[in-house]
Image: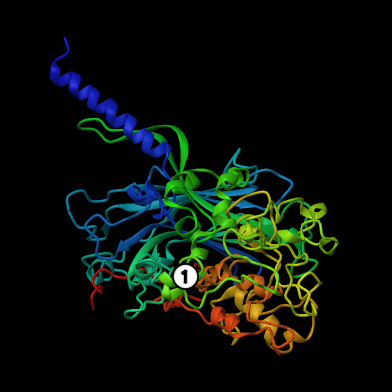
Amino acid sequence: MLTTATIYLRRAKLVLFLLIGTILAHASSHREAPLISNDPLADNTDLYAFRSPDNPNTITIIAAYIPSELAFGGPNYYTFGENVRYEIHIDNDVSTPGDDVTYRFTFTQENEDGSTFFNIRLGMQNLKTTYKVERSLDGGQSFQTIVENGIVPPPNIGPRSIESGAGLGSPNYLAQYLKGVSFTSTGETTFAGPVDDPFFVDLGGIFDLGNSPRQDGPNRDALAGTNVHAIALQIPIANLLKKGAPAQPTSILDSDYVIGVWASASRPAVKTLTPGGAPSYSGDWVQVSRLGMPLTNEAVIPIGQKDFWNRITPYEEIAETTMDEYFYNPELALYMDDDQFGGAVPAFASLRIQTNSLGSFDFSNGADGLYGLKGNPALAGTALDDAVFGTLLLPAPGKPRSVDLWPAFHTGVPNVIPYQLATGKGGNPLAAGKPFVNNFLPNGGDMLRLNMAVPPTPRTDPNFSSLGLIQAAAIGLTVAPFNTTADLEFIPNMDGFPNGRRLEDDVTRIELQAVGGAVLAAVGLWYDDYDPATSPSPVTQDLLNVLTYSTGVEQNDKAFFDTFPYLALPSRGTDIGQ
């Protein structure tokens, strides 16, 4: 006979079972979405993909998880979750649906000494974590193990835990960090472990109604001194090429060398808690987090759609058109328009979108942008011609940013008119100009898109810039000898964001400049203060205002390494506050 207490316990277990299942089934990625903020171990923070500067025959991909780790956060320091699949997805062929290459990291923990509350003592570690890497070349249908029992370095607790004989007796933390690197028989190099958070941004100012740069005090890198856990891969370009692609690119913008990269975390659909026992997991694996382009969900997707956006794949997203409006008419643009709410956000005063570019084109929210040219013979053969890409880039009136922001986040940008620099166009944005980007891969939504044929810019090059492709455009427009010819040539920083993403790229600044119309200006849709009849140069004050805009936080608090995995050592718990 069931007692009242037993019935209550069973009901409580059932409610808990349903609640956890519901949370996991509807969870999402990155801390900018409500649900994933409750599951930090599965929370994507950032994704990077770049041609390795010291090993240019390879591509480095880094995915970071577990936001805002405090270095002194013991005794239970963060580490990767055991019941999580951390995956890096690569799309390399527009003719095949879904992923072409997938790397999966899974983790196992061991408590070496259960008799102490210390995380490290007398050469033993709690919890010691190891990792396995699997690779799929058939869209996730089958996986091959390429790393078994890789070592996850311990947290950087302090000198007694790491260097002393009472701890691990290591010569230094760097020696532990390097143990996280493994080499595969298939050519990849891998890493998994705690690192300094490589992202830099004044989160406090940005989320204080766009107060960045701060109008009332110094800017602060909110992530300085915090750590994340990262998985990293250095992959031979040959391993990432689509079938049939040439072994050597035909040019530095070869379309066959474009890849799309996104990262995710998945958990079993059901977690069951029972009195006196360890949790058990069952059911299908459910994606609970994903990330491609930085700040998409954080600063473009509204709160009511964040969880939904994060639980779908990029391939589902490209077919889901309800959220396209947030890119056609981005909320951020309202704060860069004096006819809207620009006056309420003084920090964005330098960022003003074109409302009368070339005396004709209005790109402010709700305007038509270039749609007024629809059907005009001048579009023939350009990317805006329905015969070339259909209605992809000019879908309807009232969607002004369908030609710049939407493709940058959803398809990449083709090396097709008008997406060439104004250099050589003779004042006509629909003429052929100087090529500077081609990362067009239109069969998925939000991903980092990288053209692997573009050479890496040496970090010691005096032209190297954290402004990425924005700086490449500026050099191609204004700096000799690059601006003296419309020929295709390598311009420093063509390998920078949003053509992939390097660790050094100041993506917050770049994206705000892009919302402010910098890309439109680069291809010849100049700012309103340019009048060809009276202005000697299109490099006007409005353009300079956008190009010189800064949030006030322009680099990471720690220098990156010159070799894989490049990420700085995690902050040490005993150093915080010094």
Q: Which residue is drawn at 71% across and 58% down?
A: 371
The amino acid marked with disc number 1 is Gly
Q: Please indicate whether residue 274 sits to the left or right of residue 349 in the image.
A: left
Left or right: where 240 falls relative to 74: right
Q: In which quarter of the image is the C terminus?
A: bottom left
Q: Which of 242 and 163 is in front in this view?
A: 242
- Asked if 137 appears above or below 365 in the picture, the reply is above
Relative to 274, residue 575 above or below: below
Residue lying farthest to the front in this orientation: 339
Q: What residue is at 66 percent from the left and 83 percent from the top?
A: 475
Q: In this view, does 165 lie above or below 532?
A: above
Q: Position of residue 527 (x, y in %)?
A: 63, 77
State how the image is colored: rainbow
Residues 571 and 549: in front is 549
What residue sits 72% from the left and 50% below the top? Answer: 94
Image x and y of residue 574, in percent: 23, 71
In the displayed structure, does residue 131 sit left or right of residue 462? left
How packed mark 1 is, by other alpha carbons closer than 10 Å (few <14, some 14-19, many 20 or more), is some
Q: Residue 263's spot in the image, x, y percent?
A: 52, 52
Circle 1: element type = helix
Task: Name the residue furthest top.
Answer: 1
**Is residue 54 at least partly visible in the picture?**
no
Residue bearing mark 1: 342
Quadrant in the picture for residue 416? bottom right
Locate the N terminus and report the quarter of the image it occupies: top left
User: Where, by quadrant of the figure, is residue 502 drawn?
Assistant: bottom right
Tally the numbered discs: 1
Q: Position of residue 450 (x, y in %)?
A: 64, 63
Residue 297 vs residue 181, the one in the foreground: 297
Whether residue 75 is situated above or below residue 276 in the rendered picture? below
Q: Residue 551, can we see it?
A: yes
